[in-house]
Image (cartoon, rainbow, N blue to C red):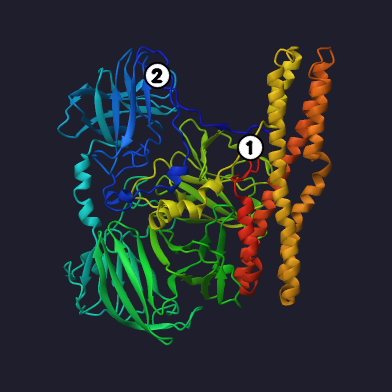
Amino acid sequence: MGRVRRFRSRPVKPAVPRCVGRRRRKGIRVSPRLVTAALVLLAGALAPAAARAAATPNLFGNPSFELGSEGWRMDKGKGTVADFRVDAAEAADGRHSALVSIGEVGDWGSQFGQSLDGGRRGKTYTFAVFVKAVGGPVTVRLEIERAANPYDRAARSEPQTVTPDKWQELRVTFTAEKDFAEGWFAYVSCNQPGAKYRCDMFRLYEGPYVPREVGERQGPADAAVRLYDTGTAAARPLPPEALAARNWRPVPAGQSGYVFAGDAVLANDRLTVVLRRQRAGAEVYSAAPSAGGGQAAAGLPGQAGAGRAAGGTLRAVLSPAGAPLREGGGSEGAKGARAERMASVKIAGQEGGAVALEAAFAAGGGPASVIYRLGMGQAFVETEPRGGTAALAIEAPCRFTVLPDFFADDIVIDASEWPAAVAEAELPADHFLLHLAPDGGGIVMAVWNPAADVVGAAFTGAGQERRLVRSVVPYGKGGKVWVACLEGSAIWHAHPVAAADAGKVAAIDWRQPFPAQWRLDWRRKDGLTDSWEMVTEGQDGRFTKVGLFGEAQTLPADRKRWTTVLGNFAYPCWIDRGGRGHVQPLRSKVLAFEGPAVLYPISRARTTPLEAFTVVDVVRATLGVGPCEYVLDVEGQRSQYKGRATCANRDFLNPIFEKGEQRRRRAEVEQSLKEVMVFVRHIRDRVEQYVAFGRWTLEHLAQQKKAHPHLAAQIQELERLAREIDARVAARRDKIKTPDEAQRMVDEFRATVLDNTGPDAPAKCKSFTAAVVEIGGNQDELVGECRWAVKVVRQRAGLLAAVDPRMAEVVAEIRRRSQQVLRNPAGHEGAQH
């Protein structure tokens, strides 16, 4: 009903820290926005710094200021002058540090830090940070206090003096003697007038103190890329013991003309890439083992890569398009003739911490070459086409393939349900695609630029054993394809859902291997996918929901939520305080779930370890910041809120008239009337955009049906879905009125009620605001229904083209236009459940 917020849940409140002496000081809100965090895996974190990450999760977000000032704040006592800035003048870790400057000091001085989740009672924690004075010695303390009243402390170090000549890692180790449900405020405090100091690499983690240098000492060396010659050509994939031992001949740098006697191997701490003479492609082995089965990895809870063993798992084979699906056999692929063997390999470059090999392959359609490049600490291989190569074939057999969609819902391909008659397909993937490895311990992710309308796919097997065995990604003009291996025990999971499970709470056989934003793709009863981000339980029993590109919201302990389409419901998927996943499939007339629900890490959370990779991390690491934001259309993801919601207008005007204050507060009333019309017109404009899309789609499909009568059945299915938009509008036409009719209501109120001070004024005001709320409420629900309908059209169009490639031409423009109309949703559309 024109609600101020789209959801009936409380937003995250900023922590209000306490000053010494119990005087409340004004806190600066620490933005929980994940627009940046969702796109962040810094260059340093993806290379050497990733290899240096601490063994346990760091509770600080943006600990080395590589995101600028995101998440950090300066609190000041009364009369204190202090500020901070982030720059690249000097750093103890990465490229940036924070410079804190203090002028006059009053009361308790300054406190520079971050609000974060509180620890658990009885657990031991260490708070450490690198500090360096500027200009002269500075005395500081490390402190942690409750982020709300009564502002009691969890830890406080002794005063420590730092000097300008070196970075010093200050620390305090403590045991949490009580629970801190409101969270902690951890900070560096200083009450020295005129002081300046730098700080960098904040760490707060469970466990005793471990010097940062100890964890770093082996990291860069392990992350470095090494090139080997095995000496002899192997007839089969390399066994784990050979990968672990690496008893091969190192190839020194500067040997551009080196001739390999055996097979060529590229290796860093994450991946091993093997170019065997007897294989028509590069074998990519992940250094992490596969625990699988939804079981937590050995080692520390929440530690990405915990239990990582020597050796590796063969995750994918990368070859020119047309390479065989399986070693020693297979058929010609979806694109061109298959490669038969590797003809030659040579060093293509050794610079910038990366090593590249160019491999030439013999194929029935002529020679084809690919450059494979591996960088320091990277979890992905970069490939470029040479010779006659037009696409990259990625052999990574899997049952589930995910085509992530950041505007609507993912498309999930379940090969076991794929039509037996369809051996090859074209999937509607623009820039990325996920192969979910059968053991649950790995994800093979492909990223490419420029965009492709479709990606080839090949299927083999029957029934439950049917698999998508290979995807074929076109390079495009001047393009590249990157293939990443995301590893970790239970990094993805599939949970079976039956129709009878609706409304029932169930713990699933999965624990998150590391903190992240986990996406759960529900299978709808109609075969489509409904994508939800899992919420996480806090220590106070409430839940935090973080959108990919918006602020966090807090859900109550009962997970109650409201959206325009679904109404009231209990949020259906969450992670408890112990990291265990839970589901409660919706019991709704609007939406029903049935079939496997698939979850995977879509993006980072504030506490995601540096060494852990998510889908968005890979996109950013491969494409770079600018292209990544363009591909994900970060600006288009942001919701828009204009004017004043109709219910807010009601709640503002009615009390004024009840108190008889309408004349005295006339200017405020006028402003509310103007703002409510801005709101009404904005929502109605969004509705009209959806209506225009639906009508264009119907006209387009009518033309396509004439041009392709043999596709009439598929086209008619899309027509039925597109007509749903007009049907929704028609059902509410009388209640939503038109913006002009709403304006006439406002004008009449202004002329006949605004200056009325009689006893009937409050009743007339209530009658007016109720009528406007009815318009707003129906518009809110209608715009959500229209968005829902467009998302269904978009997804079904992609699936129809995948099953029948002849539909690709029909649906390409529909999918492009659907993305455009879904951009910048109104706040009441329920863009993210």
Quadrant hosting residue 504: top right
> Residue at position x 78%, y 48% from top?
729
> Residue at position x 64%, y 56% from top?
818
In this rendered view, identify the residue nearer to me: 674 or 292: 674
Structural crowding at the residue carrying mark 2, measured as other residues with C-alpha within 10 Å and reported as few (<14), some (14–19) or many (≥20)? many
Residue at the left extreme, as displayed: 165
**Could you give the CA–CA distance between mark 2 and mark 1, rounded to whole angstroms?**
32 Å
The residue where tag 2 is placed is 18
- Is residue 436 among the parts visible in the rendering? no
Which mark is on residue 6?
1
Residue 770 lies, in percent from the top left, at 78, 28
Tell me if residue 718 comes above or below residue 20 in the rendering.
below
Amino acid type assigned to the residue bearing label 2 in the image: Arg
Which mark is on residue 713?
none
Position of residue 618 in the picture relative to residue 160 (left or right): right
Please state, as top left, top right, bottom left or bottom right, where the C terminus lies in the image: top right
Amino acid type assigned to the residue bearing label 1 in the image: Arg
In this rendered view, identify the residue nearer to me: 488 or 128: 128
- Is residue 275 among the parts visible in the rendering? yes
Ranked by sequence position, the earlier of labels 2 and 1 is 1
Tell me if residue 767 comes above or below residue 427 in the rendering.
above
Position of residue 533 in the picture relative to residue 664 (left or right): left
Quadrant hosting residue 155: top left
Residue 626 lies, in percent from the top left, at 43, 52
Task: Give the SS element for disc 1.
Answer: loop
Task: Give the SS element for disc 2.
Answer: loop
Residue 88 lies, in percent from the top left, at 28, 40
Residue 715 lies, in percent from the top left, at 72, 68
Residue at the bottom extreme, as displayed: 364
Structural crowding at the residue carrying mark 1, measured as other residues with C-alpha within 10 Å and reported as few (<14), some (14–19) or many (≥20)? many
Please state, as top left, top right, bottom left or bottom right, where the N terminus lies in the image: top right
